[in-house]
Image: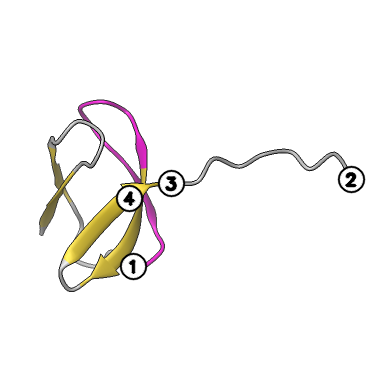
Amino acid sequence: MSAQCPECEGTIVLAADILDGEIVPCPDCGAELEVVSLNPVVLELAPEVEEDWGE
């Protein structure tokens, strides 16, 4: 199974047992991508985790 990186348009080979919501790195540009759909496979840039500093 493969998908296209939305950042660099490189091809990413995914494991057969990939899960919805899983984070995968792009081997070409290093972007962290989130699996948002499995049929068809759709990847989007993963949201960056921000510190809330107790707010």
Q: Which residue is mark 2?
A: 54
Circle nearer the viewer, 3 or 1? 3
Residue at the spot of label 3: 46
| Residue at 50% over, 46% down | 47
Residue at 32% x, 50% y is 44
Residue drawn at the location 43% of the way across and 46% of the way down: 46
Picture quadrant where residue 40 is located: bottom left
23 to the left or right of 47: left
Q: CA distance from mark 2 to mark 3?
A: 23 Å
Q: Say which label, 4 or 1, has the lower sequence index.
A: 1
Task: Name which of mark 3 and mark 1 comes first in the sequence.
Answer: 1
Q: Position of residue 16 (x, y in %)?
A: 18, 65
Circle 2 residues within 10 Å: few <14, some 14–19, many ≥20: few
| Residue indicated by mark 4 | 44
Local crowd size for mark 4, using a 10 Å CA cut-off: few (<14), some (14–19), many (≥20)? some
Q: Secondary structure at mark 2?
A: loop
Q: Are marks 2 and 4 in contact (CB under 8 Å)?
A: no
What kind of residue is marked 1?
Leu
- The stretch of residues the image draws in magenta is 20-32
Say whether marks 3 and 4 touch (CB < 8 Å).
yes
Amino acid bearing label 2 = Gly
